[in-house]
Amino acid sequence: LRTAVMLCSLMVLTGESFSELTRDIYFYKPFSVSIKVPAASLEKYKKDRVIASAVKDAEKELDGEGEILLKSSEKDSTISVLAYGSDYEHISELALEISKVIKDRYIK
């Protein structure tokens, strides 16, 4: 509701329509891969410099045309790599590369 009110206020202030205000917003198709890991790894990965570096390198490669997110699920004991970007094939390759790093680090 708050967002809707802010958007309506912006429309009144600028005199622009909703489509004009949102013309530069892009919605990317996501790619995700989940890796089953030992439960003890669910917190470790957040501080893992090798994984952080792999994510940082992938985001550099995207050059502002997407992003990489990692999230964990205690219920399933998984770490998920979520990638968003303008080039679906490219983001899927990057996400799979990061998932390989996670597997190499935590699955023996």
Image (cartoon, grey):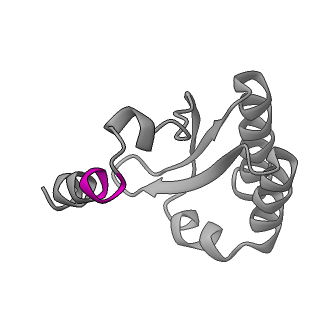
Looking at the image, which is closer to me, 52 or 36?
A: 52
What residue lies at 51% left-to-right and 33% top-to-bottom? 27
The residue nearer to you, when weighing 14 against 103, is 14
**What residue is drawn where x is 78% and y is 42%?**
100
Image coordinates of residue 41 in percent, x first then y, are 58, 64
| In the rendered image, the vertical position of residue 6 relative to residue 43, given as above or below | above
Q: Is residue 52 left or right of residue 33?
A: right
- Residue 31: quarter of image: top right
- Residue 99 position within the rendered picture, expressed as x and y whole percent measured from the top left: 71, 43
Residue at the farthest front position? 15
Figure quadrant of the N terminus? bottom left
Q: Residue lying farthest top? A: 89
Magenta part of the protein: which range? 10-14
Number of numbered discs overlaid on the protein picture = 0
| Residue at left offset 75%, top offset 51% | 64
Q: Is residue 16 magenta?
A: no
79 vs 51, left or right, is: left
Q: Is residue 12 magenta?
A: yes
Q: Residue furthest bottom?
A: 47
Identify the residue at the far left of this view.
1
Where residue 61 sits: x, y (%)? 87, 47
Q: Position of residue 16 (x, y in %)?
A: 36, 43
The residue positioned 30% from the left and 60% from the top of the image is 13
Question: On the rendered structure, is 44 left or right of 103?
Answer: left
Prevailing SS of the magenta stretch? helix
